[in-house]
Image: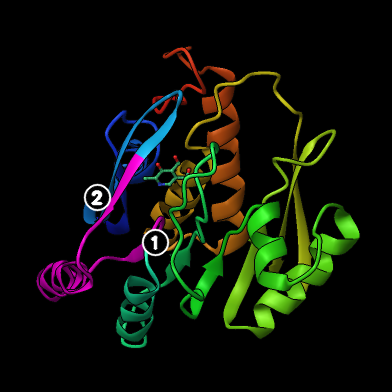
Amino acid sequence: MTVALTIAGSDASGGAGIQADLKTFHRFHVFGQAVITLITVQNTRGVEQVYTLPPELVEAQIRAVIEDIPPGAAKTGALGSEEVAARIAKLAERFDFPLVVDPVMSAKNGARLGGGPFAPCFLLTPNLEEASAMAGFEVNDSDSMRRAARKLQSLGAANVLIKGGHLRGDAVDLLYADGEFHEFRAPRIPTRHTHGTGCALSAAITAELAKGTPLVEAVRRAKQFVTGAIRSNPGLGSGAGPLNFFA
Ligand code: PXL
């Protein structure tokens, strides 16, 4: 059985974080492992509290899990502190499976969920805001996305996927892989129910990589899943509701 690991925060409301990752792994027929970095108090209206776990506890969870059942691929989400980010970067030097880093900075209402500089990884998946913060310039169109992808690759990501979900017009994601650009385009779906889209996308890519799917095809399948999951969202909650993970 194919195994994938997520290292991320808990969203008790079930739409994002660890919960979204595990549901996505399951949907992709992959056995999910989950190391928790932080606990949020939140619902679809926003994050009220963030409680970060001690870095040594995060590290111990990762060590225990991977020495017994090595995953085919892993992803990180919200890390919560620079210390946790640094420990993961150190551990990742010895990972013999691809690591996807979703450099989560903050929840939609601004609650801080991020860690320090990202670990060197196989794939980095920032949104426009995260790409801007990491590249050091405004990323808001096709040209700046291309420049940022090159820059982030030079900082330690073998491949970079910049998510254009917050662009105007179509949702165009840009993948920079092996020196080539690939665009993944989907029509914008008018809905407020997009909570957890970034988590679901990186989890779906991780599941596909664990199965051995080549990166470009993994991203294509993941994007197709997320687009369908937004389109058929169940309309739960009075704020930004979750996706349909059965899509
Ligand atoms: O979608 C980013 C994210 C990641 N992880 C956790 C979250 C959120 C957004 O709310 O709560 C735990």
Is residue 61 visible to us here?
A: yes
Q: Residue at x 46, y 60 (%)?
A: 114
Report x, y in % for residue 65: 14, 67
Q: Is residue 65 magenta?
A: yes
Give the number of the mark in front: 1 or 2. Answer: 1
In the picture, measured across the screen, residue 148 lies left or right of residue 130, that is right
Residue 213 vs residue 34, the one in the foreground: 34
Disc 1 to disc 2: CB gap under 8 Å: no
Front one among 130 and 111: 111
Q: CA distance from mark 1 to mark 2?
A: 13 Å
Q: Which residue is mark 2?
A: 32
Would you say the beta carbon of the disc 2 residue lies within 8 angstroms of ligand 1? no
Residue occupying the far front of the picture: 48
Q: Where's residue 60, x and y in %?
A: 13, 72
Please tell me in which quadrant of the rendered image residue 91 appears.
Answer: bottom left
In this rendering, the answer to whether 111 lies above or below 60 is above
Q: Which residues are magenta?
A: 49-78
Q: Which residue lies under the disc numbered 1?
A: 76
**Quadrant of the picture in which ligand 1 is shown:** top left
- Circle 1 sits in a helix, a strand or a loop, which is it? strand
Scheme of image coloration:
rainbow
Please provide percent x and percent y for residue 1: 21, 54
* Residue 222 locus on image (x, y percent): 54, 45
Name which residue type carries label 1. Answer: Thr
Q: Amino acid at mark 2?
A: Gly
Q: Is residue 239 above or below residue 146?
A: above
Residue at x 85%, y 63% (from the top left corner): 144
Q: Earlier in the sequence, mark 1 or mark 2?
A: 2
